[in-house]
Image (spheres, coloured by chain):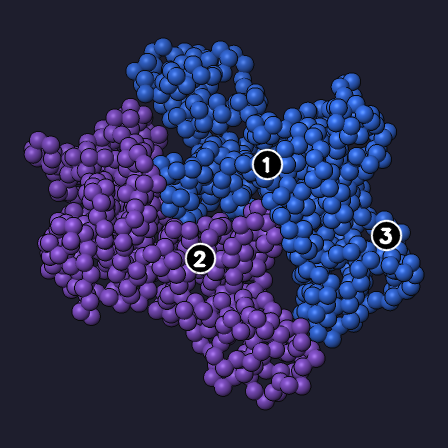
Chain colours: A blue, B purple
Amino acid sequence: MKVAIIGGVAGGASAAARARRLDESAEIVLFERGEYISFANCGLPYHVGGAIPRRGSLLVMTPERFHARTGVDVRVRHEVTAVDPAAHTLTILDRTTGNAYKESYDKLILSPGAGPIRPDVPGADDPAVMMLWTLPDMDRIKARVDAGIRRAVIVGGGFLGLEVAENLRLRDVEVTLVEMGPQIMPPLDPEMTQPLVAELERKGVKVLLRSTVVSVRRDAGRDGSGTPEVVIELDDGRELPADLVVFSIGVRPNSSLAKSAGLATGERGGIVVDTRLRTSHPDIFAIGDAIQVTDALGLPSQLPLAGPANRQGRIAADNIFGAEREYKTTFGTSVVKVFDVTAARTGATEKALRKADVPHEKVYLHPYSHATYYPGARMMHLKLLFTREGRILGAQIVGHHGVDKRIDVLATAMQAGLTVYDLQELELAYAPPYGSAKDPVNFAGFVASNLLRGETRVVHADALPEDSLLLDVREPPEHKAGKLPGSTLMPLGKIRERLSELPRDRDIVVYCAVGIRGYIAERILRQQGFRTWNLSGGYTTWKQFNP
Amino acid sequence: MKVAIIGGVAGGASAAARARRLDESAEIVLFERGEYISFANCGLPYHVGGAIPRRGSLLVMTPERFHARTGVDVRVRHEVTAVDPAAHTLTILDRTTGNAYKESYDKLILSPGAGPIRPDVPGADDPAVMMLWTLPDMDRIKARVDAGIRRAVIVGGGFLGLEVAENLRLRDVEVTLVEMGPQIMPPLDPEMTQPLVAELERKGVKVLLRSTVVSVRRDAGRDGSGTPEVVIELDDGRELPADLVVFSIGVRPNSSLAKSAGLATGERGGIVVDTRLRTSHPDIFAIGDAIQVTDALGLPSQLPLAGPANRQGRIAADNIFGAEREYKTTFGTSVVKVFDVTAARTGATEKALRKADVPHEKVYLHPYSHATYYPGARMMHLKLLFTREGRILGAQIVGHHGVDKRIDVLATAMQAGLTVYDLQELELAYAPPYGSAKDPVNFAGFVASNLLRGETRVVHADALPEDSLLLDVREPPEHKAGKLPGSTLMPLGKIRERLSELPRDRDIVVYCAVGIRGYIAERILRQQGFRTWNLSGGYTTWKQFNP
């Protein structure tokens, strides 16, 4: 058996190592067009920022060490330029010698990854315009920062754009983040990105939404220091001077080789595979960022993530060596650090549910990371999406600590098919430094279950019913510090004695800071015969929608 | 409907609040014999140590505030001294006035909690001997520490003993921890406590195992400073001078009231309840530390934990108001902080599995808390227990960061009925500051699945086969720094070329640092026809067994 693997990062290296462990006698050849295999591409921004001081620590595995361990024939700087599925041969360009040669295979694994989308605006070829995808990209950006540049513009507010913004800011560069869409971090719903924007601004990053770059213009000498400088022109006429521009406007699957070979690809360019990770040709498998996956809603999607890529590598190798394993769904579980804030999600967003016309319910809550009496507890913002039957559809959390823990628990629960009722019963580890006796995940279960059982009826801050009485059940100082426009104050502790002041012929929307006192008030009023709703997530969620 | 609740901490307060939300018109009376309801008992050690500077922050909820919110009739310093199930009446002692009175109920919820086991040795009544259970207990201990005592002896190495040891040490007290059994932290298997003992000793706590206190003797004036002093005598004749002795030798359910009322109790004194949390009398429910629960193995058990107590409170209230909810299992998910180390578990231990004669498999691994190239990554020690069919039986993790996250994911997976095969596929959130593309939980799934599929055969450090060749596949400097006695070095990278040096007529146990290189070596040797096993968890696990 001769297995050829194209692409030596993440999935490709995993597949090669797994194949060798399964079959000591197989001939395994790994082609990588770059210099490195298994380099830490997720770490690139952090070397620029200084958190990872040693460049060498990004080189997780050298070709030599990999070969010594696995006996895999690793060929770096060898680019596969053509695949002939019928003949089972590859054409390879040795980028060191410039020579082309052919190689046969029995089974082929494509792991070509994705590549950054290149900006298509005048001036984008200016040397001050960069992208961050490879180690050489990183070296170029870092060299500029080390040279003492003053101003950077990041174009694109996704994962990478945010990480680059943070890391340049940590190097004392003035950073402006330009995002074309109405929100940063497209994997989240808009209101969940509000704490991220707030954190960016708190840390000195200027965020411009709904702004498109129309050109990059060189403007040498404008800067007093004599540094060559570019000017970024936006569609609204604004001009941003910059010493460095980093475009991170998305990625695209590297599927041209697969297309040339006649393999099926999807609407967004991803290589089409079945649940065995087999392409449209039975002897060719494909894995990683280049493939089209099935998302949490069962829809074809491009979700470039390192975890799935690594697992797919194992599964493809298993299938080649006869194990019959399936890869079914990519849930899009992901996390990003933005200075001191963490944002994470799993499963479907509300945007995606609406687009796919999937009926759903949602709740917002704002639990603390751990027992509030133990130092360091911080509020997190949690959104849970689920069906009327209680099936978990997705979750998003933004906060300071413990966000990654709760998203992983919710991801596990969702993948296991648990319902929101089950979340109530999860027995999670509690001690004051780590959590609360009722964990945020339990709380999410309580709130969602109360909703489904009809014990609470909620309204949402993005769809407040008109003509209802807005009743603030917080304490006077809270009301004074900020409230829903037109709302009336009646603290929870007074409601039972002030019932006569409330209308029986009008809908009453109660709200508090985060939804708990509002829920108690709602229960009191409902049982007293009032027509009552609680504002999910309270004033805190309302502020996320109305910053 | 009149509901009486006995006990106002954790479960009792939860039950009262839930009952009120379910029924605004019910009469709800909460009896608490102490001064406080809902105080943060898990926070007591941290106020002594100073992490929680304000005593007031431990008073999570005052009786007044609770009443204002819920309209529940809260009676603190009211001790219920008798229950008459037939007459549906309680006898109460008002501890403020000294008066006794009767009160009727329709439904009763018992939430009397557990109490510390009092030491039964001569001298245990000395004023320098204390326990830490209530706020006044805490005040007494803190007063001693504030007064500048030099030496403390903690008797008992469970959760509370460890937390007290840490917090006294943080106040510069010389601390000796005396544990009767062969290990500290009985909720863990012995080898998993080794990193905790190491951390305690690193931080200056002296740990004495297999040591029983036989007496406490007052020895005034022996200390040069003139401080009154006691001497703790151990069974081996050693004597420990101390200015403070804290006994934390376990807890016992407060079930005497239930017993006097004729309610059924279990072997270890816990109140017997059904899955609806109903006692042997249909109108009396019981919750919290006082009840007998069913553990992960289906056995009756006492597992005093705050999370289950709170959830039971909700469930009992739901059942009283007609919701028909069940409480089935207490998995014993728990976590403890010992200085910079975190230890956690969920489900059954190996000790418990052996005792109950449940066939099981285990694997050890030592993954990093997050990507090793990102700063702050630390090794954790993970033990996973499972059946031959792949069902997860339990897990234990000890490490620095991310331990609570992984135990919560494993607890969720276990409670959801996922198998070790499913753990491989979990899609967890990855970015370098939070985890790895292959999360420790995925890795645990890989290793366990490899074992069950026969791709790896493992031996364990506590049962090394005799007469086998011990083959160290690490690099020479690692071998030199510490090895299994009698083992032979052959680095992984050299094995393929040195096969002829290895015996074909003898069992070969390969090992590396943590088990990964050992697994690769095992796969090579197996496929070359050698009789090979891999040491699960490698040298690191062996050191846990042989510190």
- The three-letter code of the residue at mark 1 reads Val
- The secondary structure type at the circle numbered 2 is strand
Q: Is residue A446 visible?
A: no
Taking depth in this image into account, of B106 and A356 the one nearest to the observer is A356
The relative height of residue B166 versus residue B136 in the rendered view (above or below) is: below
| Residue on which the image places disc 1 | A338
Residue B406 visible, this angle: yes
Quadrant location of the N terminus of chain B?
A: top left
Kindly identify which chain the residue marked by label 1 belongs to: A
Q: CA distance from mark 2 to mark 1?
A: 28 Å
Near-viewer residue (A24 or B427): A24
Task: Work out whether mark 3 precedes mark 1 in sequence or the reverse, and give the earlier one.
Answer: 3
Identify which amino acid the numbered label 3 is placed on. Answer: Leu
Q: CA distance from mark 3 to mark 1?
A: 36 Å
Q: Residues within 10 Å of mark 2 (few under 14, many from 20)?
A: many
**In the rendered image, which residue does mark 3 sit on?**
A257
- Disc 2: host chain: B
Q: Quadrant of residue A489?
A: top left
- The quadrant in which the C terminus of chain B is found is bottom left
